[in-house]
Amino acid sequence: MKISSGSPFEALCGLSRARRVGNVIAVSGTAPLGPDGKTVHVDDVYGQTKRCLDIMRDAIEAAGGRLDQVTRTRVMLCDMERWRDAARAHVEIFGEHGPASTFVEVNQFIDPEWLVETEADCVVT
């Protein structure tokens, strides 16, 4: 099953927001885009992370999964010194569930306004 979020980058990059194969859902790198395809919360790591995770949650739910079934997340940041802002959004979304997670610093994203992208893996039980 292929899930779309309507991002213009899905067609440009040849990707799906998420794919479900059997009981596994994989969510692609998710950028902080609004419904209009434009970057939201410019220069706000917390706001951008929250938006990425909301898009991710919607994709997981559209594929029949739940956030408590997420086994792993990846949070990619352009500035690791701002990791606490991303972590705060991550805690708000996942609470005590706490999937395995990695925070990494990257050089840049497709759009220089993006400060963060997220990915997730989910196992539906």
Image (cartoon, grey):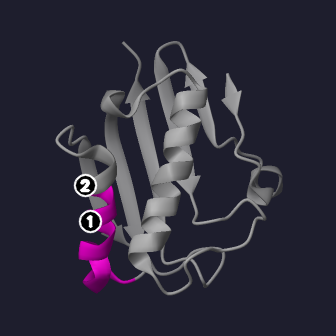
Q: Return the x and y of residue 117 as percentages of the image width and height.
A: 49, 63
Q: Is 87 part of what is drawn in magenta?
A: yes
State how many labels appear. 2
Task: Give the quadrant of residue 4.
Answer: top right
Residue 42 higher or lower than 98, as above or below: below
Question: Which is nearer the eye, 52 or 9?
Answer: 52
Q: Identify residue type, mark 1.
A: Arg
User: Which quarter shows the C terminus?
Assistant: top left
**Residue 18 position (above or below residue 118):** above
Is the Cβ of the residue at disc 2 closer than 8 Å to that at disc 1? yes
Q: Residue at x 26, y 50 (%)?
A: 101
> Where does label 2 land, which residue?
91
Residue 36, image x, y percentages: 78, 64
Query: Is label 1 in a helix, a strand or a loop?
Result: helix
The reply, left or right, for residue 113 in relation to residue 116 is right
Residue under label 1: 88
Amino acid carrying mark 2 in the image:
Val
Instruction: Give the crowd class for mark 2: few <14, some 14-19, many >=20 residues within 10 Å.
Output: few
Residue 107 on image: x %, y %: 47, 81
